[in-house]
Image (tube, rainbow, N blue to C red):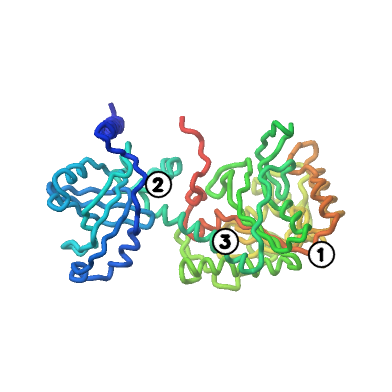
Amino acid sequence: MDEMSDLLEQRVRKLQLLKKEGINPFPNDFKVSHTSKEVFERCGSLSNEDLQRFEESFSLAGRIMAIRDFGKAAFIHIQDREGKIQAYFQKNILGEESFQFFKRFDIGDYIGLEGRPFRTRTGELTLQVHRFRLLVKSLRPLPEKWHGLTDVETRYRQRYLDLIANPRTKEVFLKRIQIIQRIREFFTARGFYEVETPMLHPIPGGATAKPFKTYHNALDMELYLRIAPELYLKRLVIGGLERIFEINRSFRNEGISTLHNPEFTMLEFYQSYATYLEMMEMTEELICSLVKEIYGQFSIPYQGKQVDFTPPWKRVRFEDSLIEIGGLPPEVLREPSKAIEVAKGLHLELKKGTSHGRVLADLFKELVEPHLYQPTFVTHYPTAVSPLSRRNEENPDLVDRFELFIAGREIANGFSELNDPIDQRERFLRQISERGEEVDASLLLDEDFLLALEFGMPPTAGEGIGIDRLVMILTDSPSIRDVIFFPLLRPER
């Protein structure tokens, strides 16, 4: 029998013995008066003399993370939702029977206790326990002797252990929660309504990506998990909701990497009577406020480098970036054959009939994007790769669109929305024709959206921000899996 199986069997026997003695190992009637943090806030600044006059007793509950047994006395550390605190058990205070019962507890068990604060000889704030209860009998020991869980695969598969063993993990996810709360407050304060749109789409649209397919039995129809909420949010704008946002999941049946998870969180927002310029200003204001609140300054570390969010952020036109940052000759922008030649030289995979704009976008991703480490808005993309964006008034081959890059990866995509239904239909059809005979569900014509657009959508600008990637940067996390509670993984064999 291996060590883990032996420990499990020992704890199961303890559980059975507790039940045989009439002790409920899983009660649910213990009342908590304070958290560990609240105890430190109340008593952390008090001297030992002050604590000797302190008569209030605290009731806490948490998981036992460490036990130090000294025979007739013992120290434990318990961990609750807001931190850890030490507790002291003395035989002469608790009595023989209670103290011996305490000695049957294991690391990992949940305990409820009542006690008064004092300081040990080393000055550590501690609770002198005068009453306690077993709240949960754990059957498996915590990993790595409770000093941390280091195996990355286990951390992702058993996130609950990661959260217990690694304070850094809990800190990251608490920051993620805080970021999303602040985003909601930011938009609500500006008159935006939070809305929800369907996850199941009859036609996946709003982006070019491979969807997950499912089937609804009662309606006898194929459906797709949404790849983006955009087209439904625009329907709401058409219906008169002029300022809306949604924070929710999207799904793309594509590769997995440090930047990609098949299930991810997006923020999308739309504002009528605004342009892509206002979207850039709002994005800069939003992210700067998040950085300042979390760090208290604009320059923060990310993977060994500093990212400086001090506004205003750099802005560069798409075509200029290819020359200035990508080092391409100007003729690549004018001559499709030159662009294809450069792309092939870089061993980029080009499909037959790929438009000039698409080739330039591929070159941008290869030559420019990795160098955009400081916050940078790239504007005026080719119309050929922006089927939902409004054409630029001065140059119809370009659109009023931007993407935000931080630390060499795309964080946001926004534009003045195309609200001409005829132009929109033509662009959808052009997208489909460029695929040739290849069938791609994401490029099917969404007649219902086009019908809605024909009723008239006000001048509008919109944007999508990848929450997971933003959280990665704001928590100095190297992988998207580090900021998603339960990332998708291949099943263990």
Q: Earlier in the sequence, mark 2 or mark 1?
A: 2
Q: Which of marks 3 and 1 is nearer the N terminus?
A: 1
Q: In which quarter of the image is residue 463?
A: bottom right
Image position of 179 (left or right of 391): left
How many angstroms separate mark 3 from mark 1 (CA)? 28 Å
Type of the residue with mark 1: Asn
Residue under label 2, please give it.
162
Q: Which of marks 2 and 3 is nearer the N terminus?
A: 2
Image position of 70 (left or right of 349): left
Residue 321 placement (x, y as % from top left): 67, 63
149 relative to 304, above or below? above
Residue 395 image label: 1
Q: In which quarter of the image is residue 121?
A: bottom left
Residue under label 3, please give it.
406
Which residue reaches farthest right?
Answer: 422
How many angstroms separate mark 2 from mark 3 (CA)? 28 Å
Type of the residue with mark 3: Ile
How many angstroms separate mark 2 from mark 1 (CA)? 53 Å
Counting other residues with Cα less than 10 Å from the Cα at mark 1, is it few (<14), some (14-19), or many (20 or more)?
few
Type of the residue with mark 2: Asp
Of 120 and 57, which appears nearest the observer?
A: 57
Under circle 2, the secondary element is helix
Contact between labelled residues 1 and 2, with CB atoms less than 8 Å apart: no
Image quadrant occupied by the N terminus: top left
Q: Quadrant of residue 393?
A: bottom right
Q: Nearer the viewer, mark 2 or mark 3?
A: 2
